[in-house]
């Protein structure tokens, strides 16, 4: 089976691309470039074979935020050219443009990092940071921070399944689900503390805090594209800055 070229890129190359997209949408004025950037990210997700997961995560994580940001700017951003009114609320051309600009930038920047984590294993990203000079303790902090929410979600699902086997109603209206979820908070917190203690003991058993150079069986390599692409990002950003200054 042929490996996907995009997925095989070094984690830092993909991380630099997310930073590149974020910087580019802040440099280029207006909202057309930001929406175009999201389209490019979607095409990359299709090429990498993660389009379904990428688009689903964007909708879940960003859609509500984007709607709120857009409406707030549309109705409350100051402007003189009124183009519509709904009751006491007026929206202006300036508010519309700024709302589209701000929401499109949030969409592009958020989507860039969502795509990065969809294309990159957390352990590969942390290992690349460690290879770049991040101390092992800092790498562990980053790794545990990125894994804490998925881990707690898995534990919560396990506890909810256990509650369901005991005859507790866990599905239905929002009130029913909230009533079933609240009793799971105590075992969820206790299990999280227990897993943290177990992890600390495991790390100490492997001499994690020993003042010696750490070695790892997990190795990451860079190819020609990984060495060229970061310079391409820099050149494009410098060109965008010069274009913005001159125009």
Image (tube, rainbow, N blue to C red):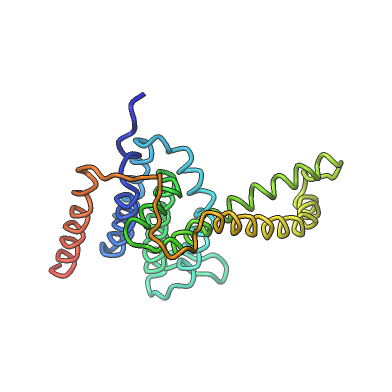
* Position of residue 226 in the picture relative to residue 53 (left or right): left
In-image side of 224 versus 66 (left or right): left
Indicate whether 241 appears above or below 50.
Answer: below
Q: Quadrant of the N terminus?
A: top left
Foreground of the two, 17 or 244: 17
Left or right: 101 as drawn, with respect to 206: left
Indicate the quadrant containing the C terminus: top left, top right, bottom left or bottom right. bottom left
Can you give x and y, in whole percent of width and height, for residue 234 in the image? 20, 59
- Residue 228 image point, x, y percent: 18, 49
Q: How far across and down, in percent of the image, does residue 44 sit?
A: 34, 41
Seen from the viewer's position, the closer of residues 52 and 4 is 4
- Residue furthest to the right in view is 167
Residue at (29, 50) in percent of width and height:
13
Q: Decide: is 143 above or below 77.
A: above
What residue is drawn where x is 81% and y is 45%? 163
Instruction: Say which residue appears at 52% left-offset and 62% top-offset.
Output: 68
Q: Position of residue 216 (x, y in %)?
A: 40, 49
In the foreground, 211 or 129:
211
Find residue 130 and report its image quarter: bottom left
């Amino acid at each position: 089976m042929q490996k996907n070229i995009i997925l095989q890129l070094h984690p830092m190359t993909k991380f630099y691309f997310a930073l590149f997209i974020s910087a580019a949408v802040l440099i280029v004025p207006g909202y057309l470039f930001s929406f175009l950037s999201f389209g490019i990210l979607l095409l990359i997700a299709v090429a990498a074979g993660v389009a379904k997961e990428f688009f689903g995560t964007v909708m879940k994580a960003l859609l509500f935020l984007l709607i709120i940001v857009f409406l707030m700017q549309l109705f409350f951003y100051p402007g003189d050219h009124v183009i519509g009114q709904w009751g006491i609320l007026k929206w202006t051309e300036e508010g519309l443009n700024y709302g589209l600009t701000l929401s499109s930038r949030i969409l592009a920047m958020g989507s860039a990092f969502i795509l990065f984590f969809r294309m990159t294993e957390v352990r590969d990203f942390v290992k690349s940071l460690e290879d770049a000079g991040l101390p092992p303790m800092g790498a562990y902090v980053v790794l545990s921070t990125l894994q804490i929410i998925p881990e707690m979600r898995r534990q919560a699902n396990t506890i909810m399944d256990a509650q369901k086997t005991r005859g507790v109603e866990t599905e239905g209206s929002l009130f029913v689900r909230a009533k079933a979820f609240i009793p799971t908070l105590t075992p969820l917190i206790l299990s999280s503390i227990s897993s943290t203690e177990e992890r600390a003991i495991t790390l100490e058993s492997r001499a994690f805090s020993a003042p010696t150079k750490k070695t790892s069986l997990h190795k990451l390599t860079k190819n020609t594209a990984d060495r060229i692409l970061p310079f391409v990002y820099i050149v494009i950003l410098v060109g965008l800055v010069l274009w913005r200054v001159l125009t």
